[in-house]
Image (spheres, rainbow, N blue to C red):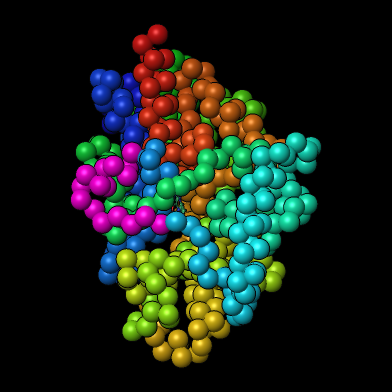
């Protein structure tokens, strides 16, 4: 590894886009990636079902502001616009009445108004929802399923800063494959975790098992979960404001439970949304048969998703399959084929799905946007402004920070 202008840590959406900006500006760089592939949380794999399946991100959110969308279109990929309404709502195995479904829609609208007018000291989303007329189902969608955290663990200020993510699209070829295509021409040192960054002299020295790389600046795109665990040791230590920010942006969890259903569509249409509200916050959402594939893709989020990760894949698959059989009848079992459970919490270099600020701590994002010593910069989904938590947002964050680095090095 030879010394360069900038070291980029991580070859996910943010790191790859940062590299492209540096390259256009004529700076030399090196991208160091801990995993043996690029893409990070954007990862499409054929391994489980013989067709592209997104283990990580799948929805191209905010397509009108998301550069991946036009690239997928230009490449002629198969796109599907997905409006995220609950098409089928169940309370355990009972189908909700039309009146109950209408009440959920009304609760959703009321929640938007409550958020708009909120000025209380209590920054817990759960407290706001408890005050309003919002029903459990509406809360499930915005809490565990969207933010990857239960309502009491979500900051209202943070939630309010996040944009409405319409319009949403899927691509049959896979979002992870799209990010891999975007990054294919970026040189990356794979399987090279950075263990330490020394910044006491001029510039930075990044230590890896394969040697030390020196540069004028570093762009760190590892998740706040990874940074909170001090997978990268900074010497001297980072300011307290930054260390506190890693802790104040804990990783939420979203777990996918795709179950193959062969020879039946369960009376559903492709891309139908089905929400099963249960007790003890053990709710599950299914995306029905995307692109008419033989797949019901289950999702659980928040604390329950962490619980299922601990219980293991077999328990997770049984949970999803049992819910389908409860609703569609035991005969469904003979249609069940392969299944799997994602587990992003066990990925050492990710440690969860995406970050959500603790109540009262939404300022952590602004704190991390401050470079340290004019040479250590942070980027990623957690610093993506209104597009936080999204893959498109991570890309825009990487680009913006790389432009900042270009300006800094030119100064
Ligand atoms: C289950 C799930 C579903 C999701 N669904 C959607 C969705 O539908 N739509 C959407 O837009 N977003 C979704 N997301 C979020 C989206 O995937 C992320 O926001 C985005 O991919 C993050 O990109 P990033 O570059 O910020 O981080 P990452 O993708 O995490 O990239 C950071 C990289 O840094 C590497 N790294 C970490 N530590 C080190 C180290 N010490 N040395 C070297 N390398 C290191 C990691 O290996 C990783 O590759 C989902 C995420 C999950 C987990």
Task: Locate the N terminus and report the quarter of the image it occupies.
Answer: top left
Using residue 403 as the reference point, say whether residue 372 is left or right of it: right
> Does 211 sit above or below residue 309?
above
> Does 334 sit above or below residue 20?
below
The residue sitting at 66% across, 39% down in the picture is 116
Task: Locate the C terminus and report the quarter of the image it occupies.
Answer: top left
The residue sitting at 69% across, 61% down in the picture is 135
- Confirm whether residue 257 shows in the render: yes
Assess whether residue 324 is covered by the magenta stretch. Answer: no
Q: Nearer the viewer, residue 3 or 152?
A: 152
Assess whether residue 76 is covered by the magenta stretch. Answer: yes
Residue 302, x across and y down, in percent: 60, 57
The residue sitting at 25% across, 37% down in the picture is 186
The residue sitting at 33% across, 38% down in the picture is 67
- Confirm whether residue 246 shows in the render: no
Residue 341, x across and y down, in percent: 46, 67
Tell me how many marks there are: 0
**Magenta span covers which residues?**
67-82
Q: Nearer the viewer, residue 192 or 325?
A: 325
Q: Quadrant of residue 25?
A: top left
């Amino acid at each position: 590894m030879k010394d360069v202008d900038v070291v980029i840590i991580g070859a996910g959406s943010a790191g790859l886009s940062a590299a492209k900006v540096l390259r256009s500006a004529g700076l030399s760089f090196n991208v160091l990636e801990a995993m043996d592939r690029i893409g990070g949380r954007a990862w499409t794999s054929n391994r489980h079902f013989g067709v592209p399946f997104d283990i990580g991100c799948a929805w191209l959110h905010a397509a009108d502001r998301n550069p991946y969308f036009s690239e997928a279109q230009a490449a002629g990929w198969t796109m599907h616009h997905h409006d995220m309404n609950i098409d089928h709502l169940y309370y355990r195995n009972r189908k909700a009445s039309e009146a109950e479904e209408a009440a959920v829609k009304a609760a959703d609208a009321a929640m938007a108004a409550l958020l708009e007018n909120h000025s209380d000291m209590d920054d817990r989303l759960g407290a706001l929802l408890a005050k309003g007329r919002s029903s459990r189902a509406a809360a499930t969608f915005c809490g565990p399923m969207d933010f990857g955290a239960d309502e009491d663990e979500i900051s209202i200020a943070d939630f309010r800063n996040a944009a409405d993510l319409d319009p949403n699209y899927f691509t049959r070829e896979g979002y992870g494959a799209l990010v891999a295509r975007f990054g294919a021409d970026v040189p990356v040192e794979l399987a090279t975790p950075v263990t330490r960054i020394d910044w006491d002299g001029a510039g930075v020295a990044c230590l890896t098992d394969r040697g030390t790389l020196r540069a004028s600046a570093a762009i760190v795109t590892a998740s706040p979960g990874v940074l909170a665990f001090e997978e990268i040791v900074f010497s001297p230590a980072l300011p307290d404001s930054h260390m506190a920010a890693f802790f104040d942006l804990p990783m939420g969890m979203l777990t996918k439970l795709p179950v193959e259903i062969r020879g039946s569509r369960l009376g559903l249409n492709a891309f139908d949304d089905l929400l099963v509200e249960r007790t003890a916050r053990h709710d599950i959402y299914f995306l029905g048969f995307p692109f008419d594939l033989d797949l019901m893709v289950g999702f659980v989020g928040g604390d329950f998703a962490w619980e299922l990760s601990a219980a293991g894949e077999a328990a997770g698959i049984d949970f999803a399959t049992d819910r389908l059989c409860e609703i569609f009848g035991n005969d469904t079992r003979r249609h069940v084929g392969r299944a799997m459970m994602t587990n992003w919490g066990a990925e050492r270099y990710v440690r969860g799905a995406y970050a959500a600020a603790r109540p009262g701590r939404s300022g952590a994002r602004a704190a991390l946007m401050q470079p340290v010593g004019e040479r250590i910069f942070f980027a990623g989904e957690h610093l993506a402004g209104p597009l936080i938590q999204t893959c498109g947002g991570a890309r825009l964050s990487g680009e913006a920070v790389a432009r900042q680095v270009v300006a800094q090095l030119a100064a």
